[in-house]
Image (cartoon, helix red, strand yellow):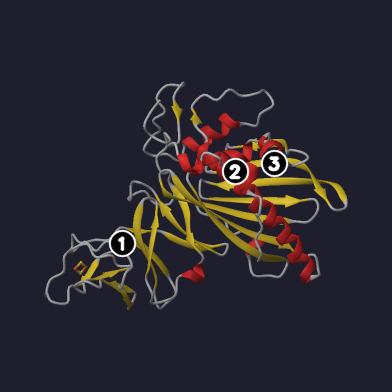
Amino acid sequence: MTDARFPFPIPFGWFCVGQPGEFEAGTPRALYYLATHLVGWRDDAGALHVQDAFCPHLGAHLGHGGKVDDGCITCPFHGWKFDAEGANVAIPYSERLNRKARLRTYPVVEVNGLAFVWYHPDETVAPMWELPALPECDDDEEWVPVLSTSYEIGTTWQEMAENGVDSAHFRYVHNTATVPELDSYDTSTFPVAAMRSSQKFQTPRGIVEGRIDSTSYGPGMSAVHFSGFADLLNLAVTTPIERDRCIIRFNFRVKSLGDAKMTQGVGQAFANEVHKQVLEDKVIWEHKAHLVRPALADTDGPVMKFRKWCTQFYAEGVDEGDERTVFTPPWWPDRADEAPAKATASARIEG
Ligand code: FES
Ligand SMILES: [Fe+2]
């Protein structure tokens, strides 16, 4: 036994900090991700910047009253000004600058309708890969955005992502009639993990042969394609809030079926099913232990291969103890009766 909830530090990678529209030019926003207080601000030229929130002068939070002008952010406390690289460019009541006063600045990309920052515990490490712009997310009318959802979950990114390779849980947690059959799972090209699987989908018109193909680009972004009854994309992005707490955002798109109402209807039904599944998974995730050496069946998915892929993103190392170590959750007396099936009694979202 150990006191730590999980053996994993916060991984490095690209992590979603919201949708581009949440950052209006000129209005800084306070953010909290990666166990770090951050400020996000868009300059007048339209570029988004994300920096550490606390002013190096006397520690004011730049997201609470900071002013944006001239491609710089000005602190609300004593008016010190910082540029988009984090350098101090003005102290209004002094002739001199303070060259040591610097804000940590995170590389930012806006792609696939989302804003991402590059995080690495060593700030001198530049982004090690790029996030691809997915053809399903460009502006043509072939693929239609349906809706986006988000969930805060009391677990790590890795425990949530392990669900993808855990084919057996679909039947028992989610009551699906069939489980995905793994065709291949390829982790040979850093930072990608690509899973290809076949799945029979239960539809109103009977059983349909389909596919679930997911491609993860590091820990922060996975594109999950469903095909068979329709072509659907769930762009799933996970951001650690702290070591043991994450936000996962799902962004659903459907390949147009011609009729706009039908397209939205299919997307909505799909999003509802995923919504139900997350509420079920959440109960398992938050109450489960992390076992360093799980007891696996020969027909389980590639759990250990998945975990090995994850390990590459932990620059600070993983402290697992020995293989018998059990990482357990706290005991919450008021949550003693939680169970997956109860979580979804009234689960439904509307777009
Ligand atoms: S704390 Fe920011 S200028 Fe003083
Ligand atoms: Fe699940």
The residue at 48%/69% (across/down) is 22
Q: Give the alpha-carbon distance from disc 2 to disc 1, as whole Å.
A: 33 Å
Q: Which residue is mark 2?
A: 281
**Residue 22, placed above or below residue 296:** below
Q: Residue furthest right?
A: 205
The residue at 60%/48% (across/down) is 279
Q: Secondary structure at mark 1?
A: loop
**Residue 145, placed above or below residue 186:** below
Amino acid at pointer 3: Arg
Q: Secondary structure at mark 2?
A: helix
Q: Which residue is mark 1?
A: 53
Report the image quarter containing ligand 1. bottom left
- Quick one: 268 or 191, which is closer to the camera? 268
**What is the quadrant of residue 52 in the picture?**
bottom left
**Percent position of residue 217, x then y:** 55, 48
Q: Quadrant of the N terminus?
A: top left
The residue at 34%/74% (across/down) is 71
Q: Secondary structure at mark 3?
A: strand
**Which mark identifies residue 196?**
3
Amino acid at pointer 2: Asp
Amino acid at pointer 1: Ala
Nearest-to-viewer mark from 3 and 2: 2
